[in-house]
Structures are given as structure tokens and as C-alpha cells.
């Protein structure tokens, strides 16, 4: 009777484990655009366009390759609204021996899927997602033996395990990490290349119209969507990155510039996370650029570390720490998000720029997410649950397995330091060093107190003071508490008062 194989919106790879033994004559592949997945948070419009259009193109490619595909459109009059119900309908319309699916990217969906077998009265096989390089057992084995987890050590294991950038048993160039050569401020005369864009074809145009119609109250606009939606196009994005931007990736990895969200980043997370590109092929291509002398080692190592290190690490971390991770709240923060997280209307230019970029592109690069919006979210004591929901909704590359460790672990320290060795908080000085935002800001980055003092400055010290009990034992915070001791009581009091005023104004709004 054949097998029903479900492919979800972030599983658009022909090498999916759920397709590995697919019989073209007998089996059916199901893809379904459903309300439940499109609205469990109000995803940015460009995120929905990306996923639906990529799903439609992927289904077409499968059909052209001779597979039997059932594709359920969002506006089909009998659309069932959830993945379970779509699977149910398919199994009522045709008899199958079993349902096969690959491991999802979110805990809520895994819990739901584990019930499907009894709900459907049919075998449901959930297979590992082997697009990732580390299995969940691999991470568990690594983590269980350690008192402290740090990405850097996991990453070294992964380098040895894959042989990427290795010369025998040693790391290429004699060091595991070249970050001391990276992370420069970007001089004004450096002009980053234009990012990849592609004109929407008919399929994408139909999805844009659908999204503008059905998701009109979601963030952003769909009409200017111009991202890749097929594997061929995603491979072009990769090639363009390798030839035009990889060489400078390390140097300007942490830089921010007003009016340019793309810089020298790869913009590949959209495609890696929905399956159009595979992490191993992307890393091999970057490694090849190093071996061919097309890009320096500091850039290539830095780039590979983001994927082989961070990306694999956060995925293992997520599954290892769920479901407690979603409730973690080390600092017991409960403030709701200020309105400007949605509108971008704030006098803090750095926040205005990063949120405006996010609204416009469903993208912001790492340092904008981490050191501007993330930094503010922690300093202002925003509730982890609300911050997680925001990040999951606004970025087109966001799925909980990657979003939540970055938010609860990396930016909010809500896990109490399992992922990061100290909170990533910083005053306005850091933002000023790494960006040109401060020169167009009504606030003065040099001022800690007074009428136009930069809010990041007094919020930073207010945070440090408030959480002294929880942080003072952290040796990486030692210098900071030393500088606090040298500050006058008047300055401290003034900063605390100003912080309180700003935080109250958020609460009152
Ligand atoms: P590049 O800078 O070119 O990096 C290359 C690749 O490395 C990325 O495509 C990505 O696959 C990987 N990578 C880099 N950093 C990380 C990281 N910290 N965790 C996991 N993978 C990483 N990334 C997501 O893919 N989805 C998210 O929902 C997401 N949410 C984030 C939330 C916060 C608060 C922070 C601080 C980071 C988040 N990141 C997330 C990580 C990172 O910011 C994005 O992967 C990156 O900005 C994507 O742009 P890029 O492809 O141009 O990345
Ligand atoms: C994110 C998303 C959206 C917006 N829509 C769909 C959809 O209609 N159908 C589908 O199969 N998947 C969608 N996705 C991706 C899923 O939510 C994703 O599989 C989970 O987030 C788990 O990774
Ligand atoms: Fe941001 Fe402060 Fe700089 Fe303004 S002065 S852009 S608020 S860091």
C-alpha cells in the first residue's frame, strides 16, 4: 500500500532521512501549508513567503523527478489547518502501511508527533535528522562528561570528527581559533558588495499575494520579497558569498553600519535552516576556498566555526535542555516588550536601526541581534518568554532549536550560564566602537548620566548593581565589579535613578 512521507517546511532537502528509501511508484510525499504552523507565532511575512514558496518549488522539483507528491495549498477550501489533520486526511483517502517523518526542529512538534501513532492508528516512524553533523547522542555523550559546557571545546571535537580544516591531528595554521585577527571596526571607506537578490517568479508572486491577503496583520511586507527559493538559487547565494564576501567575513564579522544590514555576512541561515543548503556542503566549499588561496584562514575558520561550532552546539544544547530551557529565568525578569520592538519608534538610534532592518528584511546580522537588541533585552529585564516569542517571529531563519538557545542562553543568560560563561551585556561604548549608529543619535554615548545620557550606559551599570549577588562570583565579571567600586556614590545613584525612570516608562506605556 506504500508509505506516506511527510516533509515539513524546514525539511526541503532531497537527502532527508524520511525520503531515503522512498519508492517512486508506491509511496507518496506530503507537503502541507497549514494555519497552525504559520500562526503559532505571528511569523514575519517574508518568513512565510520564503517557506511556502520554497515548499512549492521543492514539491515541483520532486514531481519532475518522478515522485508522487500531494501538495496542500494554504487556501485549498478543504485545508485541514494542522499537520496532524493533513496526515489524517491523506491516510483516510488512501491506505498506507505507515507514516515516515524526520525529526522536527521544535519540541512542541516532537511532543505532538509522538502522539500521532495512537491518534492515527497507524505506525509513525520518526527518523533522525541526519543533515546535522552531531547526533543528539553525540552531544549528550560530550555534555554528560563535563561540569561546564563551552562551545569552543565542542567545536574542537567536531573539527577532529569531521577533519574540516585539519592537517593530520592538528588544526590548520596551528591554532583552533583565529578570532584575535577578527572583529575589526569597519572603516567608512569599505563598501560591502550588494547581496544576492532574485525577481519573484509566478509561484513566488502567488505566495506573496496569498501572504499579504491572509497574514496582513503579521510584521513587515511581502511585496518586496527577493530571496532565493530554490536549491539552484541558494547555491548561487553560496557562490556569491564565497567569491565576494568570505575573504572579509572575519574582519568585519562584528561590525555594524547604518543602512546596511548585509555587510560581509553569508545570509545563508535562511537556506541552511529550511534545507535548501546542507551544512556540510557549505563548510566544504569554504574550506576549498582556503585551500585554493581564495580566502584567508582567519575568515574561513571563523565562518566554519559558526556552522560546525555554534550551529551544531545550539542544536544539541536545545534538545538536551528542553523542556526546562523554555521556562528558565535566572534573573526572574518579567517586563513585557516595549512597543518599539514592533514599530522601531525609539530615540535610541542603534535600536531604531536594528529593529527597522529586522522589520524590513526579516533579517539582522549576529551582532545586531546579540549586542544591540539582545543587550537591551537583558539590561531592561524583559521576560524571557516574550523575548523568545519575538525572535522566533521576526527572523526568517528562526526555528526554536536555534532561536531559543541563542535567546535564553546567549543573550538573556536565563539558563544561569550553561551556554555562555558570562552575560553578554555592554554599555554604549561597545556599540559606538563597532558601529556608526551613535553619531546619528540624540543621546550622547559618552554620558553616563544627565539629560541626554545614552540609556545603554546607565542601564548597564544598573544591571551590574542589581545582580551583584548572582554575578559577583563569576571570575569573568571581576574587573567590572572592580570598576564599580571606583565609582562615586553620586554617579551610581544618578544612574540607578535614570534607569528606574526609563524602565517605569516602559511599564507605564
Ligand atoms: P553568518 O554571520 O554568515 O554566519 C554563518 C552561519 O553560521 C549562519 O548562517 C548560521 O547558520 C551559523 N551561525 C552563526 N551564528 C550562529 C549561532 N549563534 N547559532 C546558530 N548558528 C549560527 N540563527 C538562526 O539561524 N536562527 C535564529 O533564529 C537565530 N536567532 C538568534 C537570536 C539571537 C538573540 C542571536 C544572538 C543569534 C541568533 N542566531 C540565529 C544566530 C545568528 O545571528 C544567525 O545565524 C545569523 O545572523 C544568520 O545570518 P548569516 O547567515 O548571514 O550568518
Ligand atoms: C515555519 C513554518 C511555517 C510558517 N509554515 C509551515 C507550514 O505551513 N507547513 C509546514 O510543514 N511547515 C511550516 N513551517 C515550518 C514548521 O513550523 C517547522 O517544521 C517547525 O518549526 C519545526 O522545525
Ligand atoms: Fe545606541 Fe547609546 Fe549609541 Fe544612541 S548613543 S546609538 S542609544 S549606544
Image: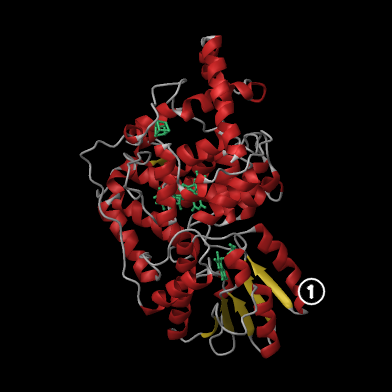
Which residue sits at x=40%, y=69%? Answer: 229
Residue 442 position, x and y percent, is: 37, 32
Which residue sits at x=54%, y=11%? Answer: 490
- Counting every numbered tag in the picture gives 1
Q: Quadrant of the C terminus?
A: top right
Q: Sort mark 1 into few (<14), some (14-19) or many (20+) by Cα contacts within 10 Å.
A: few
Instruction: Please state if 284 lies on the left or on the right of 409 as rendered.
Output: left
Q: In the figure, 154 relative to 231: above or below?
A: above
Residue 36 position, x and y percent, is: 63, 68
Q: Circle 1 sits in a helix, a strand or a loop, which is it?
A: helix
Instruction: Please state if 461 lies on the left or on the right of 241 as rendered.
Output: right
Quarter location, residue 349:
top left
Q: In the figure, 47 relative to 83: above or below?
A: above
Q: In the figure, 114 relative to 505: above or below?
A: below
Instruction: Please state if 288 lies on the left or on the right of 149 as rendered.
Output: left
Question: What residue is disc 1 on?
Answer: 118
Residue 275 position, x and y percent, is: 48, 65
Display colour scheme: secondary structure
Residue 436 position, x and y percent, is: 32, 36
Which residue sits at x=60%, y=67%? Answer: 37
Quarter location, residue 170:
top left
* Residue 117 in view here: yes
Check mark 1 vs ligand 2: CB closer than 8 Å? yes or no: no
Between 290 and 202, the one nearer to me in the picture: 202
Q: Quadrant of the N terminus?
A: bottom right
Q: In the figure, 53 relative to 377: above or below?
A: below
Instruction: Please state if 462 lies on the left or on the right of 363 as rendered.
Output: right
Name of the residue lying farthest toward the left: 189
* Residue 158 in view here: no
Amino acid at each position: 500500500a506504500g508509505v506516506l512521507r511527510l516533509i515539513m517546511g524546514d525539511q526541503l532537502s532531497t537527502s532527508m532521512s524520511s525520503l531515503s528509501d522512498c519508492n517512486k511508484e508506491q509511496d507518496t510525499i506530503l507537503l502541507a501549508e497549514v494555519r497552525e504552523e504559520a500562526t503559532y507565532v505571528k511569523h514575519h511575512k517574508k518568513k512565510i513567503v520564503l517557506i511556502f514558496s520554497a515548499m512549492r518549488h521543492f514539491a515541483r522539483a520532486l514531481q519532475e523527478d518522478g515522485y508522487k507528491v500531494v501538495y496542500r495549498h494554504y487556501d485549498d477550501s478543504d485545508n485541514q489547518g494542522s499537520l496532524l489533520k493533513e496526515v489524517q486526511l491523506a491516510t483516510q483517502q488512501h491506505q498506507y502501511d505507515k507514516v515516515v517523518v524526520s525529526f522536527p526542529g521544535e519540541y512542541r512538534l516532537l511532543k505532538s508527533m509522538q502522539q500521532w501513532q495512537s491518534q492515527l492508528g497507524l505506525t509513525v516512524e520518526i527518523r533522525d535528522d541526519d543533515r546535522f553533523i552531531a547526533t543528539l547522542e553525540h552531544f549528550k555523550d560530550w555534555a554528560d562528561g563535563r561540569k561546564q559546557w563551552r562551545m569552543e571545546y565542542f567545536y574542537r571535537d567536531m573539527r577532529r570528527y569531521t577533519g574540516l580544516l585539519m592537517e593530520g591531528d592538528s588544526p590548520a595554521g596551528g591554532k583552533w581559533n583565529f578570532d584575535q585577527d577578527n572583529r575589526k571596526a569597519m572603516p567608512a571607506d569599505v563598501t560591502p558588495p550588494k547581496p544576492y537578490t532574485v525577481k519573484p517568479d509566478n509561484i513566488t508572486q502567488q505566495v506573496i499575494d496569498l501572504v499579504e491577503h491572509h497574514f496582513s496583520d503579521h510584521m513587515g511586507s511581502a511585496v518586496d520579497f527577493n530571496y532565493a527559493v530554490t536549491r539552484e538559487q541558494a547555491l548561487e547565494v553560496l557562490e556569491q558569498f564565497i567569491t565576494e564576501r568570505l575573504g572579509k567575513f572575519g574582519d568585519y564579522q562584528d561590525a555594524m553600519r547604518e543602512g546596511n544590514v548585509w555587510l560581509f555576512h553569508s545570509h545563508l541561515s535562511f537556506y541552511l535552516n529550511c534545507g535548501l543548503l546542507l551544512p556540510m556542503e557549505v563548510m566544504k566549499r569554504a574550506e576549498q576556498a582556503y585551500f585554493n588561496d581564495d580566502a584567508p584562514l582567519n575568515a574561513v575558520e571563523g565562518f566554519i566555526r559558526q556552522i560546525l561550532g555554534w550551529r551544531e552546539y545550539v542544536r544539541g544544547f536545545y534538545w538536551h535542555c528542553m523542556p526546562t530551557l523554555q521556562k528558565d529565568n535566572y534573573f526572574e525578569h518579567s517586563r513585557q516588550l516595549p512597543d518599539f520592538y514592533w514599530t522601531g519608534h525609539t530615540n535610541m538610534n542603534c535600536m531604531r536601526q536594528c529593529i527597522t532592518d529586522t522589520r524590513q528584511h526579516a533579517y539582522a546580522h549576529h551582532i545586531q541581534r546579540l549586542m544591540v537588541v539582545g543587550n537591551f533585552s537583558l539590561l531592561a529585564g524583559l521576560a524571557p518568554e516574550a523575548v523568545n516569542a519575538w525572535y522566533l517571529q521576526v527572523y526568517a531563519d528562526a526555528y526554536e532549536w536555534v532561536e531559543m538557545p541563542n535567546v535564553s542562553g546567549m543573550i538573556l543568560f536565563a539558563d544561569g550560564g550553561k551556554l555562555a560563561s558570562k552575560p553578554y551585556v555592554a554599555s554604549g561604548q561597545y556599540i559606538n566602537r563597532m558601529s556608526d549608529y551613535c553619531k546619528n543619535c540624540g543621546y550622547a554615548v559618552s554620558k553616563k548620566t544627565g539629560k541626554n545620557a545614552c540609556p545603554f550606559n546607565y542601564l548597564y551599570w544598573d544591571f551590574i548593581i542589581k545582580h551583584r549577588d548572582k554575578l559577583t562570583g563569576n571570575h569573568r565579571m571581576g574587573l567590572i565589579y572592580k570598576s564599580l567600586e571606583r565609582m562615586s556614590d553620586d554617579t551610581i545613584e544618578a544612574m540607578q535613578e535614570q534607569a528606574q525612570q526609563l524602565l517605569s516608562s516602559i511599564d507605564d506605556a
